[in-house]
Image: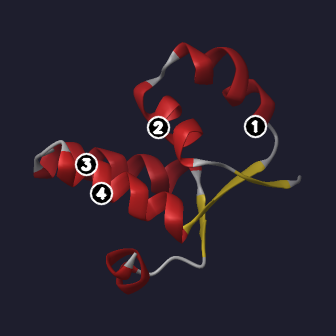
Amino acid sequence: MAYIVVDTDVVSFGFRQDTRFTDFYGPALEGNRAVISFMTLAELKFGALNRRWGAKRQGELVAYLTRHYVQYGVSDRLCQIW
């Protein structure tokens, strides 16, 4: 099993089940561990705040990330500073 660093767009496509993920990125990640950096988490959180997502939708994002991605070098403080 390889570790593959995944960019914000790929995570976003996966969360929304966009065809770019279901047809291309998802199959490419199968059998591997997808990793996100602090910057990806910060960008996703910023996007959610910018779009005024409620607590439920933000919770769904956190649950999705927890299920599908290894978070490398991530801390809430670092994300807030970014």
Query: Closer to us: mark 2 or mark 1?
Result: 2
Query: Closer to us: mark 4 or mark 2?
Result: 4
Residue type at tag 3: Ala
User: Upstream in the sequence, badge 2 or badge 1?
Assistant: 2
Q: Is residue 65 above or below residue 39?
A: above
The residue nearer to you, when weighing 69 against 48, is 48
Residue, disc 3? 48
Q: Residues within 10 Å of mark 1 (few under 14, many from 20)?
A: some
Residue, disc 4? 46
Residue, disc 1? 29
Q: Who's the residue at 10% across and 47% down the image?
A: 54
Q: Residue 27, percent across and down?
A: 75, 25
Q: CA distance from mark 4 to mark 2?
A: 13 Å
Contact between labelled residues 1 and 4, with CB atoms less than 8 Å apart:
no
Q: Which mark is residue 12?
A: 2
User: Upstream in the sequence, badge 1 or badge 3?
Assistant: 1
Q: Who's the residue at 45% across and 81% down the image?
A: 75
Q: Is residue 27 above or below residue 32?
A: above
